[in-house]
Each structure stands twice: as C-alpha cells, then as structure tokens.
Image: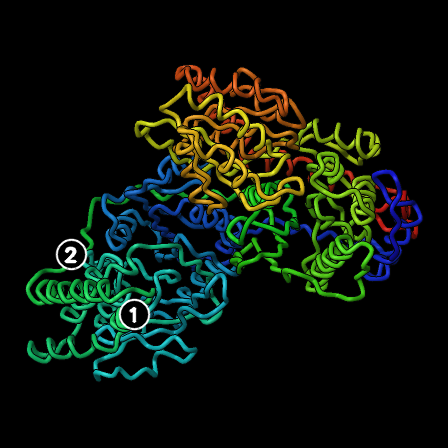
Amino acid sequence: MTATAPLTRFASAATLADTLSFLDTKIGRAPVAAVADGAAAPPTSRAAAGAALPSVSLIVTTLDRLPRLKMLLAALSHLEDDDFELIVVHGPSRDGTAAFLASWPGAAKIVGCPAANLSQARNLAIAQATGDILVFIDDDALPVAASWLAAYRRFFADPANRGCAAVGGPVVNATSGAIEFYRGACSEYAEPSPQDGRDGRDFKAPTGGRVVPAVSGSNCAMRTAAVRAVGGFDENLADYLNEADLCFRLSRQGHAIGFLDGNAVRHAAAPSPWRTRWRSIFRADTYFCAKTSRDGFARKVAMTARAARWKHIVLDIRRGTPPIGWARKLRDLGRSAAGFAEGLGRGLLGPRRLWRAPAAPAPRLHFRAARPARKLRIGLISRTLPGAGPYGGPGQHTDALAKGLYGLGHEIHLFARPERPLEAGGVGYTVHARPLAVEDPAFYDPAVPGVSRRLATAADYHQAIELLEQAGRPLDVIVACNWDLEALAVIRSGRWPVALYLVTPLAMNMELGMFARNADNFLWNSLDRWQARHAAMVCTPSGGVLEAYRSLLGITPGELSGHAVLPLGIERTLLPPLPRQGRRRLLFVGRLERRKGIQTLLAALPAVLPEFPNWDCHIVGDDTLAYEDQPPIKPRFLSEHRAAPWLERVTFHGYCSHEALHEHYRRCDLFAVPALYESFGLAYHEAMQYGKAVIACRAGGMPETVADGVEGLLVEPENVAALADALRALMRDDALRERMGRAGAERIRDRDNHETFARRMEARLLAYREAEAAPAETMDETPRYTASAAS
C-alpha cells in the first residue's frame, strides 16, 4: 500500500486501486455463490403442539428503569412461545414509565404500585394472574435463549416435576459473563450458598441451620396455586430475601424447589438504592431469621446475631464497599444495629404482611408480539455506543436504530469497539464487542497511518461477520455509517448487502480546516467516495448531506444505489422538563471545535449577556481540544474576558455522562449550537423533545432538522451579529420560546423518534430484500453487491 499527495482532495486512481487490491488479499475476496436466505420464519407457539402445557402469567416489576424495561418488552417478542399473559407492575415511577406503558402497543395488564416495595408489586401481579404458572424476570434482565419461556412450561408439564412448586435458572452478568446465581440455597439464618459454580444443595450453613434450595427473582417460575396457598411474598421483606423466604414456606408445605441449568438470563444490574440501605437490609435480614428459624427464642436471637458477623452485608461495611471513610463506616454500622433491632422486634412480635386474595382477576389478556412481515437478521456497525465511553452522532443514531428495529421484531447483531465493557444483550439482540484497536503490522504503512488503522479495523469487522455466518447466523443486511470506513471491507467483499449511511464527509472537515490536507486524508476521501458508489443501498439523513457529497466529492445522486433520504430519530426519554428555578439557562452542547460554531457563540456572549442579567450560559462538551492549531478555546476565552462581570455566568462543564447531559437539556430555557455544518444535528432534537426552542444555522442538514420560525431560529454560519439578534429575540420573549418548544416536542413525538426512524429503515430494507429475491439472470463471477474494482 503506497500513497501519494495529489493537489486535489483525492489520492490518485492508481493509489486507490492498489489500496483496494491490498484489502482484497486481507479479506480473501473471491467470487462467491449466493448464500441461503437467512430470514427466519415467524416463531410459533408451542401451546398447539401440547395441550397439557400450563398457561403462563409473565410478571415484570419496574421502578424508574424505563430504558431497561423497553429492551425487555422488545425481547419478549423474540421468544419462540408467545402464548402468555404479561403483567407489568410499575411505580411509584418518576421517569415516564407510566406514559410509556399507556401508549405501548403490546398487550399487557398494567398495574400501579403505590410504594417502592418489590414484594408488594409482585403480590399485586399475583392478584391479576390467570396463568397456571407465574414466571418472574427483572426489568434489567433479558432471556438468553428463545426457548426460555417454553422451557419453564415444559418443566411444569413433566409429570416427574409434579411435586415441584418453584424452579429457577442461572443469572449471568450481562457485561462480564460471570455467574451471579446458579443453584443457590439459603439457610434459615439467611446464610446464602457461595456462588462459585457449586450446587447449593450441598451447602452446609456455618450456623448449622436448615438449608433449602432458593431461586432468584431475576429468573424463576412458580405454580400459581402453591404461591397463593402460602400467602405470596411477605411485604415486610421489601427488596431483600423475599424469594428465599417464599422458598422456605413452599418447602415447609412439602413442595420441592428445582433448577433448570440451561435456562439463563443476562442481568445488567441497573443502579438501585437498596444495595447500600443498611438499615433496611439488616431489618429484612433479621426479620427473615426470626420468622424462618424454628429454634427457641434464646437460640434464635443468639444465632441471628452470630450469623450476621460473616455475612456480606457486614463485610461490605467493614471493608468499605464502596470505599468510605471512618465517619461513614461508623454511621452505617449504627444504622445496621438499628435495623437489627427493628427486624428482631417485627420478626418475633409482629405479623407477616402476605398476599391478600382479592376479587377475581381481570380476564386473561394474551401478549401481542411484534411480528414483522419478514423477519430480518440485521447487522449494525458502530465503533462507539452510548454507555461504552465517549460517543458521537453515529454511535447515538446506530444505537437508537438498533433498538427501534429490535422493537419491530427483527434480530439484531451490533458490532462495536467499546472503551468500556458492553452488555452482551439477550435473545434476538447480540452485541459483538471487538478489540478497541486492531494491531496488525500487515496493514501498517507509515505514509498513511490513519488509513492503515481504518483498513485493519474494517477487515476485523468483516472477519466477525464472516464468523457469525459460519456459526449458522448469516446476516440479511448490514447497516453502517461511512465515517471511519468501518464497512469498507464488507462492501468490498460483496458477500452481504450494506445500507451505508452518509454523514458529514471527511472532505467537509478538511474544508473547515479541522483535518490536514495530506496523503493520508486524500486516500481516506477516495475510499469514502468509493464505498458510497459501491454500497448496495445509500441513505442520507438530509438533502444537505447529499449536496456536500456532490460539491466536495463529485458524487451525483444517480451514482448512489437505492438512495433515500431517511431522517434520523432519537430515543425519547419521556421525562418532563425540569421546573424553572429562578435564573434562565442558555445551553450549548458539542465538542468545542470550529465546526460546532463555539467560536461564534463565545463571540456573541459579550454583547448579549450584559443585557440579560437573569441569564446564565452553560457549555457542555469536550473543552480540551486544540482549536485550529492553537490551544483549546476555553482558556483563551476565559483569559480574554477575565475582568468582565458577566463571565461568572458562563460555565464550562466539559464532557459529561448521558444522564447529566439530559439533566442539562431538561433544565435549560434555550438551546443554541450555531454549527458551521451538520449532516443532521441530533443535539437539536435532543433538546426539542423537552420542549426547548433552538437556534441553528442555514447549512448542511440543519434547515431540515429545525423548521425556521416554527421550532427555532436559523442564522447564517459564523455571523456573530445575526446570532446575537436571534439570542436576544428568544431570551426576551417567553411566549415565543414556549410556542417553538411545543412545536419541537410535537415533532419529536410524532415524526422524528427512534421508532419512526426504524420503521422508515425497515421499509427500505424489506423493499431491497424483496427486489433481490425477484427472478434474476444467472449469476456471473462477480460478487453480488460490488459493481467494480475502483472508480
């Protein structure tokens, strides 16, 4: 691979041809035959095959975990058995869960819970259940196999398991793959068996107390009649030891507790305040011992206190898990002692709070699974993703599209290079984490180090997709962004159709002076133009992107196969705006670089902020970047205006987490990013979903993202005076901001969210597959999706 430095934006034709030929040798490109159609037929219920299978009520309890709940509900459509009743108990939620469930298209019994009490929520679900068996799964877990629910039904239908009232399955950490629960057991003094792969039935409690097998509420099934007969869950055990307590009561009625080794779920362990509420934990632990042990009063008290010394909850406080100072440690020990006393009193003197038989439950409501007309197995490629380190627009819209297509019933395979471990997904949704950097000397050319790295990465993605096919999971189509050439090797091989999403081209960044005009980037430009011309389908988020490719790369729409403008969509949070707290907030979100227009905003602030003493400016984004071969713009701005009285009202927050970013969106009164160019501009829609008026520029895709005068105002790029006037117009007029904010929120709700985005993409992919399946001429020796070698 050799490179030259032409005087245009591109490498020479010979260099491009040499580079593609080199890539051919690394991916083994050769003529291939058509692969078999990998689209799976819609799954069918097992109920018709065996009338003796018990009916199921599937129970999900949730509290302020809406993103997790959405993934779980989508996963249920990928189970092979959809003959079940779904009961979702939520609350008291504050994250928009109630609004989501009210409009969710699937069929479920929705029940509100008045208190943050898991046992109470489960009892409310039991009261509504009509199934012969109750299946429980946590809102932050996903089944691993499509047969997960069917396996529980078959277990209870087996006459050999007639005496079994409860059965559990393994719980696997979704990120590390470590076993969180496997064949567990618990003693009457709340001593759990170690989770080290050994069978809990062989566990000997240090106190010598009786041990029974236990199940995890993240993954278990129980006979409805048996659970109701013993009173369901004890609501005095709000969130700890509730399953173990129920297993003891079932066992004492003569029921067995079983385990299905292969019926696993992946558990993401979403944040929970319960894990360090030591008073509540010790109260539950001591209450459990007092109620469960059949020892006499004196021994019961002594053994409860003795057992506490070596339990993980005590060890966590002693070790400081998480790390804490001595003052905090002493406070936590004090709270634990108070919880111990309260639990002992309630356990010895108070009654249980068990399930109360209500009137008959509502009629059975059959789950309505998402069943596309044709189920596709779709691969998506994105180096960065939310939750795995810093991410940009491509990572955000790829993640949103993957979730949207998954919710429509398609099988998803997501290929990424996370900086931090990613969750592996569950049934129908698999995350393939690739190495962050591909170190392959065979790809390295010192003349073009950037392209060398990108070619190695592209070849690695190709290999991962090839391995998936060899494992019997051939992809029907692959969706990828053009940036970083991540799908180049896949397009070049011609073995799978690629829908290529064109975003801001490298050539635009070169024009803006953000990337050097050198041989490395000239070759990158040439490869970008080549992949756009040879992808099976090309999508652009706006017409502005298409114009950039025409003017900068010389590509006409007629050269783009199956081109369509498909606007992006964000995953709505459904959180309301935060109430105003006196001062008003102007918000900028983005990297502090020239393309994002930070220099224009900072130049306007000295003229605007003195006129509006009740307004502050908050700037969120990486502020450590060098700016046009100079030091970062933040310290230069602060130094230049250090004597200005308004400067204290300008706050640079730097890069922040996804959660913190959305707090900024919710709290702001006006959003302004005067970017020089955006292919679409997801950040504007992120703000608009919370009813915020926005200011953008007349460039790229922004006029298609923000309707001027309707959802916000558009100004010319790098026009400081025009930006200052737009800021004044909206900062002084509350009614205008609110009117534009309402229009923006309606747009995101109705047109530009990740669900509408997924439906638009689904229509394009299905149309392509149908056209490809139409009768065609006999195949020649050329790969199916590659037109030519280099052009």
Which residue is located at x 75 percent, y 53 percent? 450
Q: Quadrant of residue 201?
A: bottom left
Position of residue 708 relative to residue 193, above or below, is: above
Check disc 1 and report the residue beneath it: 316
Which residue is located at x 63 percent, y 25 percent? 718
Between residue 649 and residue 254, name the one nearer to us: 649
The Cα–Cα distance between marks 1 and 2, rounded to whole angstroms, is 29 Å
Left or right placement of residue 97 versus residue 274 in this view = right
Front of the two marks 1 and 2: 1
Q: Quadrant of residue 233?
A: bottom left
Q: How is the image coloured?
A: rainbow
Q: Position of residue 286 (x, y in %)?
A: 17, 68
Q: Secondary structure at mark 1?
A: helix
Which residue is located at x 37 percent, y 71 percent? 258
Whether pointer 1 and pointer 2 mark residues with C-beta atoms closer than 8 Å, the reply is: no
Q: Secondary structure at mark 2?
A: loop
The disc at residue 353 is: 2
